[in-house]
Image: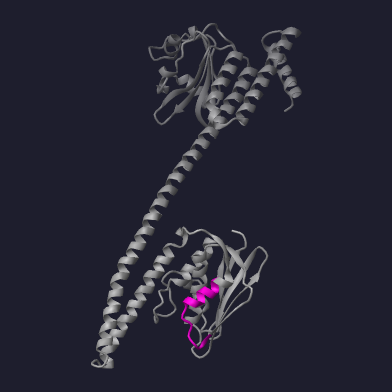
Amino acid sequence: MKKEDLQDKNQLSVTNEGENHTNFSQPEKDKIIERQLRFQDLLISISTKYINSDLSDIDKLIRASLQQIGEFVESDRSYIFSYDFVNNTTSNTYEWCSEGIEPELDNLQDIPVDYIPQWIEAHKKGEPFFVEDVSTLPEDGEHGLRAVLEPQGIKSLITIPKIKNNELIGFIGFDSVKKINKYDDNEKDILFVYANMLVNVIQRKESEERIKEQEKKKEELLKNLSLQNEELSEYAHVVSHDLKAPLINIHTLVSWFIDDNADAIDEDTMQPLHQALFNVEKMNFLIKGILDYSTIDKIESEDKQVDFNELIKEVLETILVPDHVEIKVQENMPSLFGNTWRFKQVFQNLIQNSINYGKEEQGRVEVGYTDKGDHYEFFVKDNGIGIKAAYFERIFKIFTKLESTGSSSGIGLSIVKRIIKYYNGSIWLESEEGVGTTFYFTLLKTA
């Protein structure tokens, strides 16, 4: 609404009021309109400050606005109360007092609403409660409204309900101590606007305080999680070491026994000993896999530019490649910024998986990539036994294996998926039983 429209509206209000109550002269009407416009300008100024203010200034701005509005309507005390309808009380939360007026904020906490029934009734209807002359109120006992107001020296008062989401939450009030004060309908309307402004700004303050509290809790939670992760990482390494030590001893003792008694023990007796060695190796792979899986996102070594040509070459040097398996790596593989250990884990597990499930007669594994613009799409392809479509998702779950033979831990593909996810990439596969499997995964060119 434009200022001129407000002026026309105010002009009409004053004219109607004059027709119903008092015949104002033109100069008096102009004076009333001018006052109302100044009141509106003051409200706009306060609203602008609220909107542009920092949360830390809100309490200060609310008190300043109470003073500005209080002085404008010529009251001696202005304040904000909150209702607590669970306990049926009301409490003073903000207060401004003019010079020479005693503050009442500390004295007006948890006041029973039963003391002010007419007050509450008006506010629940969304109406102001106005007492032009307190001395005309009935003497209705020590807890009556007059008995509450007169000790504070109040001669006139007006209170405006604060309503949030159709719920009565409190009120703003203005006490006149030095003289009786009157409020016309236009001033009441403007005070309602001010009350709504306060509801919004206090709601904003509460929301931002909740957000700050949530951020604080989040920081504490992250700090605790970080400490727990460190402890778990240390625990995983300790457990890994403690579990591996007896496995090494068992493997050594069984191997010695087999070597020392090779001529004295027949094949049937030797079979359980070889099975024991097999299970020890399987357990060793399992422990290593769990440790690798648990430390994927906790590696502290620095990231760097990693040349995948060199990386895959190093991976192949650590893998036992059977004579019947041929591995072909595409030339000019790219370089990416990241962690060498993580990248090695990806290629090592995928290549080892292709070897394990390749053809026994003549296995073939191909490693390569395609440039997709903002990312690279890598692949590891084999001509092995293939995988049923029903298993495409299951194989990435930890401890899942397609067959129970072999010493594989069933963790390798879970490690791969977790690392790719760590780098915000994707992994999937295409496969046909008896023909082979191709694993695809993506890595962004820039982290």
Residue 394 makes an appearance in the image: no
Indicate the quadrant containing the C terminus: top left, top right, bottom left or bottom right: bottom right
| In the rendered image, the vertical position of residue 271 relative to residue 341, given as above or below | below
Residue at position x 39%, y 51% from top? 227
In this view, the residue in front, 263 or 271, is 263
Residue 113 coordinates in the image, percent (x, y): 42, 23
Whether residue 314 appears in this view of the structure is yes
Q: Which residues are magenta?
A: 311-325
The image quarter containing residue 432 is bottom right
Q: Which residue is farthest left?
A: 264
Residue 386 location (% of width, % of height): 52, 82
- Spot occupied by residue 62 in the image (x, y as percentages of width and height): 55, 24
The quarter of the rendered structure image containing the N terminus is top right
Residue placed most toward the observer, 407 or 345: 345
Residue 312 magenta-drawn?
yes
Residue 179 occupies which quadrant of the picture? top right
Q: For the point 36% across and 55% down, which residue is it?
A: 231
Image position of 428 with respect to 149: above or below = below
Q: Is residue 239 magenta?
A: no
Q: At x 41% / y 31%, what residue is drawn? A: 86
Residue 72 drawn above or below residue 216: above
Q: So how many labels did they put on this image?
A: 0
Q: 100 or 437: nearer the eye?
A: 437
Residue 293: where, in percent of width, then height? 43, 65
- Foreground pick, 66 / 117: 66
